[in-house]
Image (cartoon, coloured by chain):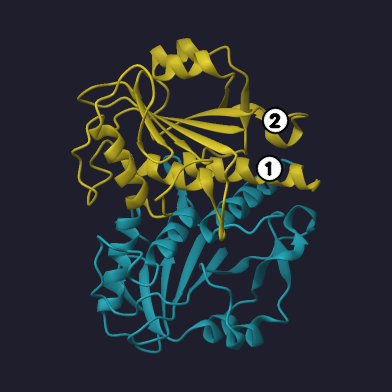
Chain colours: A cyan, B yellow
Amino acid sequence: MKRFIVTGHLASTAGNFSLNDLPGAGRMDVLCRCVNASFFLSHDFRRDVECYLVLCGEPEPPKTVMFSGEKVRYLSPDERSAGSLIKKALALPARSEFRESTPGVYVRKGGLGQVLDEFECAVLAESGQDIRSAKDLPEAYLLSDHHNFSEDEMSLISNLPAYSVGPLSLHGDHTISVLNNEFDRRRAGWH
Amino acid sequence: MKRFIVTGHLASTAGNFSLNDLPGAGRMDVLCRCVNASFFLSHDFRRDVECYLVLCGEPEPPKTVMFSGEKVRYLSPDERSAGSLIKKALALPARSEFRESTPGVYVRKGGLGQVLDEFECAVLAESGQDIRSAKDLPEAYLLSDHHNFSEDEMSLISNLPAYSVGPLSLHGDHTISVLNNEFDRRRAGWH
């Protein structure tokens, strides 16, 4: 199982945002593209992936929305489709445990600390170890949206192993595409 | 200069589609994501890229919309932003030569044949040479949307050199992200 965890520092935690203005919902568009990059193949779907969106915007931060590649339905590649499923998840009253809002999409209260308690995560940073030179790839990766990690977040993650996909700082979804490609190549015996 | 050329087999050639339903405009969402992947870096922009969208849908196929990374303005990462600039380009009466519709975005009549007359292109195919093993990377890449290349297109491209980014068939935008990453690494001396 591969896991991609994306922090949306201003992403709305209410299910009343407009699908016609995903950037206006605390840059929800960034998170929607990360969902796309996590799962979609050409005429196929990555069932071995989970994507966690840690939403830290108003009015009820933090919440975590999780997409399960194994179980998700009704997800299309466009941003609006992922946005619609996130919106439905946020419209459900969140509790401390995950609740399913639509097939394969879940919501709970809680943020980054809770996810880090559950999984051994690596963090993506330009100064990290090149993923191509890593003997074994970690299974869970923490990414940020268009904002850097906050001081509070840094205190949680400063001891995590750091990896890099390349010399330039990429958008989260592009980073996920490169990571998935590296996994694909290793699994198929490409060097 | 890197060039990504994406064929949208059903993509609308009229500027009257709805930004609220990009998939309904002949899967214009696919092309919008390719524009995003071509250009965006985290807090930076790839000025050395051009992205050509070859639109083959009704009512006036084919048309080509070109985004110049050097000159484009008013482009944000979300699908709707690229869709809005494509829509403005298609609202302009197209001629055989490129006309600028908004800064750095251009439209003309004509399709794949014309682009192939102008650039030496490589085609992306799972059976092609692994890009990591290529001594020199081609500068222009031809990709398809969610449909395979047609028989007419195949007759134009069957002699082009073929490259592969990995063992699985990816969406066009994910392929562009992996290609850009390979270019980034080579330029920075990463192996």
Where does the N terminus of chain B fall, quadrant-wise? top right
Q: Quadrant of residue A23?
A: bottom left
Residue B29 in view here: yes
- Residue A145: percent from the left, percent from the top? 51, 68
Residue count near mark 2 (Cα–Cα under 10 Å), binned few <14, some 14–19, many ≥20: some
For marks 1 and 2 on the same chain, the one whose residue lies earlier in the sequence: 2
- Residue B189: percent from the left, percent from the top? 81, 46
The residue shown at (26%, 29%) is B13
Mark 1 in CB contact with mark 2 (< 8 angstroms): yes
Q: Which of the pair B144/A120 is nearer the observer?
A: B144
> In this picture, is A35 found above or below B190?
below
Q: Which of the pair B188/A82 is nearer the observer?
A: B188
Question: In the rendered image, which residue does mark 1 sit on?
Answer: B182
> In this picture, is B105 found above or below A33?
above
Measured in 3D between alpha carbons, the distance from the residue under mark 1 to the one under mark 2, in whole angstroms, is 9 Å
Question: In the rendered image, which residue does mark 2 sit on?
Answer: B137
Q: Quadrant of residue A122?
A: bottom right
Where does the C terminus of chain B fall, quadrant-wise? top right
Q: Amino acid at mark 1?
A: Glu
> In this picture, is B54 found above or below A169?
above
Q: Which of the pair A173/B32 is nearer the observer?
A: B32
Residue A98 in view here: no
> In this picture, is B189 found above or below A154?
above
The reply to whether label 1 and label 2 mark residues of one chain is yes
Q: Secondary structure at mark 1?
A: helix
- Residue B43: percent from the left, percent from the top? 56, 60
Chain of the residue under the numbered disc 2 shown in the image: B
- A164 left or right, relative to A144: right
Q: Amino acid at mark 2?
A: Leu
